[in-house]
Image (tube, rainbow, N blue to C red):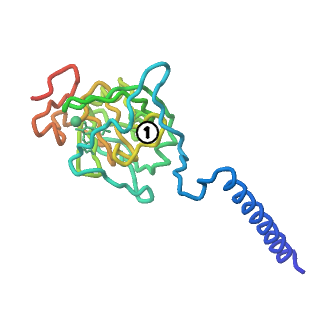
Amino acid sequence: MSINTGLKQSRAALRCGCEKHILVFFLLSCLIFPGCTSQQVISINGTEIKEYQGEKLGSVADFRENSIKGPQYIDLSTYRLEVSGLVDSPKQYTYDNVLGHQRYSKVIQLNCVEGWSVNALWEGILVRDLIDEAGAKPQANTVIFYAYDGYTTSFPLQYVRDKNILLAYKINNVTLPIRNGYPFELAAEDKWGYKWIRWVTKIELSDNSNYQGYWESRGYNNNGDQSGPMFG
Ligand SMILES: Nc1nc2c(c(=O)[nH]1)N[C@H]1C(S)=C(S)[C@@H](COP(=O)(O)O)O[C@H]1N2
Ligand SMILES: [Mo]
């Protein structure tokens, strides 16, 4: 008998043994938990937290679905986040490449102009870190974000840098649900909800400080500060 077939046989023996154990375990657990044969949802991602450092949080379920084309389904196997425009070296990141950056979390409230708001714990990476990796050219003063549904919005580069703006992949400790922008939503702190672009696909450095995004070109304020006007 060669070493190879010996190995195969012992593996097969192992498998059989395992299967027996699993069967016994299954039968026993059915005796203990009679409902065990019905389908259950098993959380592989932890559960949503409702409070953080004493502060009460809203829930993923509190967000109203108001996207221009409904929720977008992004396939991670082909997904790339592009960082381009006025940069020294344009980049393309996979989801894992993005998550490979230093991660941060922060409680931030989103306020929609429709009159609802949600306070949540956002976890993400700094947009600034991606921009610095690509190297913004000196003329760049604006950051334009693009999304899978054609939605766009923009910010002064200084805001993104100085405010440590997060590109979020988790909310309240769970991976962003599809309708909340999976894989990434921009947590545009201090800005109206229409600046919180979801399903982000591209970050472009530009020198066009008058660029107007989807809602901005339809009358909403380009600056989007919650402390400032909603329109104009
Ligand atoms: N890609 C994309 N992002 C978008 C929108 C959209 O239609 N498409 N709507 C915006 C508006 S108006 C709001 S209030 C927030 C809501 O985000 P949330 O559901 O994650 O809270 O998403 C913003 N981001
Ligand atoms: Mo909104």
- The quarter of the picture where residue 85 lies is top left
Q: Position of residue 70 (x, y in %)?
A: 25, 50
Q: Could one spot residue 75 in this view of the protein?
A: yes
The residue beneath circle 1 is 133
- The quarter of the picture where residue 134 lies is top left
Q: Name the residue at 74% across, 65% down.
A: 19
Q: Position of residue 73 (x, y in %)?
A: 35, 55
Q: Name the residue at 23% across, 32% down.
A: 112
User: Which residue appears farthest toward the bottom when viewing the image?
Assistant: 1
Given residues 123 and 12, the one toward you in this image is: 12
Looking at the image, residue 44 lies above or below residue 3: above
> In which quadrant will I find the N terminus?
bottom right
- The quarter of the picture where residue 200 lies is top left
Q: Position of residue 218 (x, y in %)?
A: 11, 39
Quarter of the render that holds ligand 1: top left
Q: Could one spot residue 200 in this view of the protein?
A: no
> In which quadrant will I find the C terminus?
top left
Q: Name the residue at 75% across, 60% down.
A: 24
Amino acid on which the number 1 mark rests in the picture: Glu
Q: Is residue 59 left or right of residue 224?
A: right
Given residues 62 and 190, the one toward you in this image is: 62
Q: Is residue 5 left or right of residue 181?
A: right
Q: Could you say whether the residue bearing mark 1 is in a helix, strand or loop?
A: helix
10 Å neighbourhood of mark 1: few (<14), some, or many (≥20)?
some
Ligand 1 contact, mark 1 (Cβ < 8 Å): no
Looking at the image, residue 58 lies above or below residue 72: above
Q: Name the residue at 48% across, 30% down.
A: 104
Tell how many labels: 1
Q: Position of residue 92 (x, y in %)?
A: 40, 50
